[in-house]
Image: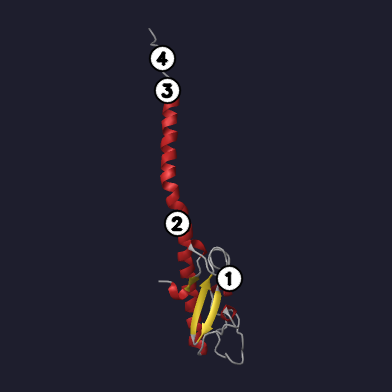
Amino acid sequence: MKQKTTYRQHSAFTLMELMIVIIILGLLAALVMPNLTGKSEEAKQKLVCIQMKNISQALKMFKADNGRYPTTEEGLEALMKNPSPEDLPNYAKSGYLEDNNLPKDPWGHPFIYLEEDNNPELISLGADGKEGGNKENKDIRLSECK
């Protein structure tokens, strides 16, 4: 009996094929990356509004129990610990925030709380943590959130 000998050809990519693939991947990256980089900051700005709305709900519960919002001096800490047990006898025993923990904005800065004429306002100073600014450094106010 005769054995048939078969030869296998080794298939591999040529240098030209590899260069074409690398160029195509580079073009795709050049088109996609600019669209992705701005989305991170945009997502953080939306998250700020969600966090502020959650804090706002806690402030409304505080007001429902106590007849007023915390003063600017009492601050958001009043949502975690009763600032004046004599004046606020209906204060919730567990506080008004989940886990009794005051959230920070996505950039790690504390929220600013102001109360004037029974109108609470929350402010995030943006990425730079300073007043004013543009784009990702822009201050975000609860009253401006949709």
- Alpha carbons under labels 1 and 2: distance apart: 23 Å
Using the rendered image of the protein, determine whether residue 28 is visible from the camera's viewpoint. yes
Q: Amino acid at mark 3?
A: Ser
Q: Residue at label 3?
A: 11
Instruction: Quickly name the residue at label 1.
Output: 110
Say what amino acid the circle numbered 2 marks: Lys
- Callout 1: few (<14), some (14-19), or many (20+) C-alpha neighbours within 10 Å? some
Q: Residues within 10 Å of mark 2 (few under 14, many from 20)?
A: few
SS of the residue at dot 4?
loop
Pointer 2 residue: 39
Residue type of the residue flagged with mark 4: Tyr
Q: Are the residues at dot 4 and dot 1 in contact (C-beta closer than 8 Å)?
A: no
Q: Residue 54: percent from the left, percent from the top?
A: 48, 74
Residue topped by disc 4? 7
Q: Residue furthest front?
A: 133
Q: CA distance from mark 4 to mark 1?
A: 71 Å
- What whole-number distance in Å separates the C-alpha atoms at marks 4 and 3? 12 Å
The picture quadrant where one finds residue 114 is bottom right
Residue 13 visible to an observer of this rendering: no
Q: In the structure shown, which secondary structural element does the residue marked by tag 2 occupy?
A: helix
Asked whether disc 3 touches disc 1, contact meaning CB atoms under 8 Å apart, the reply is no
